[in-house]
Image: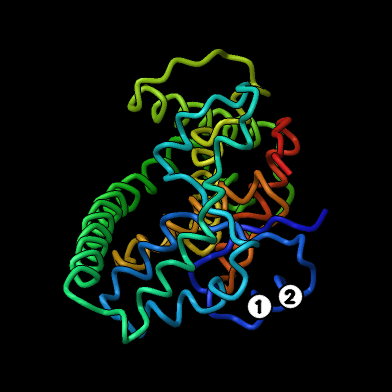
Amino acid sequence: MGQWMVVDSNMIQSPELESFLRHDSCNRAVVAIEVFFELYKQRSLDGLRRGLNIFRRYPGQVVGLRPTGTLMKIDPLAPDFAGMLLLQDAGRSIAEMAALLEPSRIDDHVHQQLTAKWDSAARENDSMLEGAVEILVSLPEMEEQMFSRSEIGIIRRQDPYTLDMFGSIFGAAEQLSDTFSDGLGIRRGKDGAVKAGTLTFRIGLGLVIYLLWWISKGSQSRKKLEATRNDILDLHLAAQATYFDGFLSQDEKARWIHVHLDGALSMYGGMRCV
């Protein structure tokens, strides 16, 4: 059947990705739309050509994911839940875009298309920076509300968590999931297994796991805004990857979040799509 792996933006030009696709024609690179925003925000034709190069050579093995906001609204009980997550024609669209980027094809119309995509990526980047500010402000408050001083010591020593700590972690994830759902105008039931199938819950749990990483590193109060923005993007990709076979990333923290998020979901009854 092959493996379906979500691909981080730092992997799209890597030999590892090409090896993965070449190894088995049934393997699939699952690409979030935010990864393309990372390409477009460079405002570079050469950078875009390099970024699409591997995907262009394996168009039948590239699958796109719908935008995160759309994914968060999808009901995990929907009959075709897995199909609703995906943009099946992503490989064809990439091949068409790569063809348009050939120097002989660049004209005013192509420039207008690219400018629109670059501007959209810039707006998305500004939105994620705003989200990064909120995350930076909320981390100390979450730490204080969720864990005692002795529990913070357990996290920093990487000792086994207590049952009360697990209760705090999953309870906070549910509260965040409900907050995200309310913001999107979504009403969902209280069944834990169903809730664990939603992206709102998985991002909420991912945010709590990101908090655990932050505490384990000493609860640093200063952090570059752009770095936190990148962490948010990685968190979204790690959450999306829990629906599939894994996550291809060169970022150690992103892989750590995915591994712990996937493990926590297995405790909670979370499902996969492939």
Distance between the alpha carbons at the discs numbered 1 and 2: 6 Å
Q: Position of residue 64 (x, y in %)?
A: 52, 53
Q: In which quarter of the image is the C terminus?
A: top right
Q: In this view, does 226 lie to the left or right of 268?
A: left
SS at mark 1? helix
The residue shown at (45%, 24%) is 178
Q: Position of residue 123 (x, y in %)?
A: 21, 56
The residue where tag 1 is placed is 18
**Among the 4 quarters of the image, the one containing residue 272:** top right
| Colour scheme in use | rainbow
Q: Vertical placement of 26 versus 270: above or below? A: below
Q: Residue furthest front?
A: 104
* Amino acid at circle 1: Glu
SS at mark 2? helix
* Amino acid at circle 2: Arg
The residue where tag 2 is placed is 22
Q: Vertical placement of 54 versus 172: above or below? A: below
* Residue 158 seen anywhere in this rendered image of the structure: no
The residue shown at (68%, 55%) is 259
* Residue 203 seen anywhere in this rendered image of the structure: yes
Q: Where is residue 60 in the image (x, y as percent from the top left)?
A: 63, 62
Q: Where is residue 184 in the image (x, y as percent from the top left)?
A: 35, 27
Q: Vertical placement of 129 versus 56: above or below? A: above
Q: Which of 265 and 87 is in front in this view?
A: 87
Asked whether the beta carbons under mark 1 and mark 2 sit within 8 Å of each other, the answer is yes
Q: Is residue 54 left or right of residue 68?
A: right
Q: Which of 120 and 88 is in front in this view?
A: 88
Q: Badge 2: how crowded within 10 Å, few (<14), some, or many (20+)?
A: some
Q: Nearer the viewer, residue 86 or 94?
A: 94
